[in-house]
Amino acid sequence: MSVVTQGTQLFVLANGVVSEIECITAFSPGGSPADQI
């Protein structure tokens, strides 16, 4: 699985399916998203 961040959008590629998640500030797997970039 690969995760690519672009601006405030989060693109997750899993099993050949690309999922787009907007407002990645609400998506924080263990910390601030800005700290993971």
Image: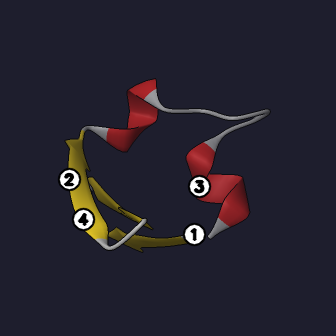
User: Along the polypeptide, which appears first: circle 2 or circle 3?
Assistant: 2
The reply to whether callout 4 and callout 2 are in contact (CB within 8 Å) is yes
Q: Secondary structure at mark 1?
A: loop
Q: Is residue 14 left or right of residue 2?
A: left
Front residue of 22/19: it is 19
* 2 vs 3, front mark: 2
The residue that mark 2 highlights is 20
Mark 4 to mark 2 CA distance (whole Å): 7 Å
Q: Is residue 35 left or right of residue 8?
A: right
Mark 4 to mark 3 CA distance (whole Å): 22 Å
Mark 2 to mark 3 CA distance (whole Å): 18 Å
Rendered location of residue 2, percent (x, y): 54, 74
Q: Residue furthest right?
A: 30
Residue 34's tag is 3
Mark 4 to mark 1 CA distance (whole Å): 10 Å
Q: Residue at x 38, y 41 (%)?
A: 24
* 4 vs 2, front mark: 4
Residue 10's tag is none
